[in-house]
Amino acid sequence: MVMSVLEANVPLNKWEELKASFRHSTQILPPQICETLLIQSIDNPERWKIVTVWHIKRHIKLVQDAMRNCGAAEIFRSIGIEPIQGMFNVTISAREPDLGSDQTETPITDMLVVMDEMG
């Protein structure tokens, strides 16, 4: 898998437009995409990223071309902002299989205590 990251500073008056553009552009994802996320920095709320995980690993050039011409870049461009692009190889991944479990409400400090006891 490959992960692409598009990032840009987005002024407050463009946030709703950015979110609407993301929702519209991601209604139907191409089969090469596993998942895509629109994320906002906690420390700097004007900093936004679109993180996309791609199935493709062998043909990085295809991903780069798709990134330049795909909806993700156009989401930022539609509000007049040119994003910075980056690509990363996903070397290891882990996922919680039960995202709806009660454990999602467990404070992280409690989980760290359990993990410390296991180690």
Image (cartoon, rainbow, N blue to C red):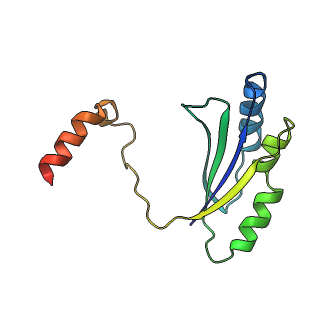
Residue at the far front: name it. Answer: 43
Residue at the far top: name it. Answer: 13
Q: Where 69 sits versus 114, above or below?
A: below
Q: Where 71 sits versus 68, above or below?
A: above
Which is nearer the eye, 25 or 1? Answer: 1
Residue at the far bottom: name it. Answer: 58
Residue at the far left: name it. Answer: 117
Residue at (65% x, 62% y) in the render: 87
Displayed quadrant of residue 33: bottom right
Q: Position of residue 81 (x, y in %)?
A: 83, 40
Which is nearer the eye, 52 or 96? Answer: 52
Displayed quadrant of residue 32: bottom right
Q: Where 64 sits versus 12, above or below?
A: below
Quarter of the image with the C terminus is bottom left
Residue at (74% x, 73% y) in the render: 61
Q: Position of residue 71 (x, y in %)?
A: 79, 49
Quarter of the image with the N terminus is bottom right
Report how many numbered discs are placed on residues in the image: 0
Residue at (22% x, 34% y) in the render: 110
Which is nearer the eye, 10 or 97? Answer: 10
In the image: residue 78, left or right of residue 101: right
Residue at (72% x, 66% y) in the render: 63
Q: Position of residue 114 (x, y in %)?
A: 17, 43
